[in-house]
Amino acid sequence: MTSNGLYRVITYKDLHWWVQGNHGGLNLSAIKRIVDQLEAMLSHHNKVLVLRFDLHCKSYSPDNRELSKFLKQLKIKLKAKYGFVRIGYVCCRERAKANAQHYHLALFLDGNKVNYPSKICEMIECTWNQGSVYFPKNRYYKLTRDDFNPILETVFRLSYLAKTRSKEGTLPQTKKHLSSRIQRGPRFRFKN
């Protein structure tokens, strides 16, 4: 791994990935899950839409039960409206010194079935009833199998979720990094 303070380069799957380096340490297994879940989605779909957002909680919870409930309800709604066969995600829980935790998430969706995420953003806002939802500027990426540069940009952006700073204040048994478990299909592997 090389670093200049603002970014780091890690090698995974014989490829070099630029990741954010100005937020302290990084959880390398979280970075690998981001790469693995993106690769898995692109192995099943030639286009993938990645949507980034944050969920803020009204009050502290020692576990991720409300997040799990939210993801389950959102997946049901998305599958009913769009007919998605699979929905990928990566997520991290942060608290630091705040009264309540918040979550940084990214959804990975079949880009052949959705081109722009405005309706999905509305679904997210209607489904999360434990606090507020925040959508950052440049909240989505459209990825295709044959263009590696947007994939690199997406991994760089999502590497923020793998930072180790501000994960304190959480019980040891509570997961700080979560992801879907989509298995990679045989048709696609990342290569530069």
Image (cartoon, helix red, strand yellow):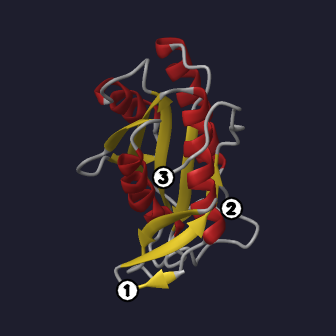
Real-space CA distance between mark 2 and mark 1, rounded to the nearest whole angstrom: 27 Å
* Residue labelled with disc 2: 175
Q: Position of residue 19 (x, y in %)?
A: 44, 69
Towards the viewer: 6 or 67 = 6
* Residue labelled with disc 1: 5
**Residue at 50% across, 70% down:** 95
Q: Position of residue 43 (x, y in %)?
A: 60, 33
Q: Position of residue 162 (x, y in %)?
A: 53, 67
Residue 143 as seen in the image, left or right of residue 10: left
Tag 1, which secondary structure? loop
Judged from this view, the residue extending furthest toward the bottom is 4
Does the image show residue 132?
no
Tag 2, which secondary structure? loop
Label located before the other in sequence (2 or 1): 1
> In the image, what residue type sits under mark 1?
Gly
The label shown at residue 192 is: 3
- Judge the density around disc 3: few (<14), some (14-19), many (≥20) Cα neighbours within 10 Å: few
Residue 119 as seen in the image, left or right of residue 47: left
Q: Nearer the viewer, mark 2 or mark 1?
A: 1
